Amino acid sequence: MAKKILLVRTSSMGDIIHTFPAAVDVKKAFPDAQLHWLVEESLTDVCSLCPAIDALRITAFHRWRKTPFSKEVRKEVRNLQEQLRSESYDAVVDTQGIVRSAWAATWAGVPVCGYSWKTAREPLASLFYKKTFSMPETLGAVRRYRKMLATSLGYTIDESHPKFGICPPRLPDIELPERFAAFFVNTSLNRPKHWQEDRWKAVVSGLASQGLDSVLFWGNGVEKERVERIASVSERAHVLPRMSIPEIAAVVSRAKIGIGLDTGLMHLAAAVGI
């Protein structure tokens, strides 16, 4: 009988993308396995980029924590717990290593594999695991997650050659320059993480002088205003319409280079190989 495996990585976008190679490894080691992924509801479209994932199981911790004791939240949590238990997983592996993810992993009702006390992001998370492994963060995110799955499930990997396996969808119906750089100027992190707009403008102008257009993305009104100010410096800078993550992946995969901050979209650009 084929294995059924639950991989727990609820957030964030960048870390989910960094876990894709681990999912690819699982399907390579166990081609007939069913790989399910426990993820936050706002990030399901990110997981849709990875064909190694067979099914998603959805958490909503960011929404639940606003009214944790409401009747609706308790019902949603109970339904998810029942759904996970009904799957009868052969293995559950938590690559996130925080109390929230470790607790949710136990809802499947089977022993959970996770990080040791000294290597979990939140040491208390290790108390929820039946089997723990020492996986220090110094390994780097991609290698760490791959080794966690490989060690937990008992297969070997080529640590030097991760495969993200991302399959971007068809390009949305928009006009793109023939040669362009993808700019990721916005971040969900605190404002001090933002780079000064005049420096972004200098990069846009510099690329334009070398015959390379720039395309900029946004996700809300504030971000749109920022990218419009940056793009105003050159006719070769283009603010794209608001798009879903899969649509952005389709655009980014056609870019010559990606330039950005420590943000999920920048990790996506690296994962698609630009």
Image: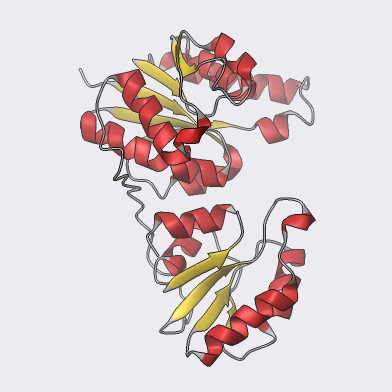
Q: Which quadrant, please, contains the C terminus?
A: bottom left
The image position of residue 52, as x and y in percent, is 32, 40
Q: Nearer the viewer, residue 166 or 161?
A: 161
Residue 119 versus residue 63 in the image, above or below: above
Q: Is residue 212 visible to us here?
A: yes
Residue 203 sits in which quadrant? bottom right
The image position of residue 1, as x and y in percent, is 20, 17
Residue 35 sits in which quadrant? top left
The image position of residue 254, as x and y in percent, is 39, 71
Report whether 131 appears left or right of 34: right
Disc tally is: 0
Q: Residue at x 68, y 73 (%)?
A: 227
Residue 64 versus residue 17 in the image, above or below: above
Q: Residue at x 48, y 85 (%)?
A: 212
Residue 126 sits in which quadrant? top right
Q: Nearer the viewer, residue 72 or 15?
A: 15
Q: Residue at x 70, y 86 (%)?
A: 232
Spot the residue most to the front.
Answer: 138
Report whether 65 appears left or right of 31: right
Residue 23 versus residue 272 in the image, above or below: above
Report whether 228 appears left or right of 129: right
Name the image colouring. Answer: secondary structure
Q: Residue at x 50, y 63 (%)?
A: 248
Q: Is residue 57 visible to us here?
A: no
The image position of residue 7, as x and y in percent, is 43, 28
Q: Nearer the viewer, residue 136 or 262?
A: 136
Residue 87 versus residue 33 in the image, above or below: above
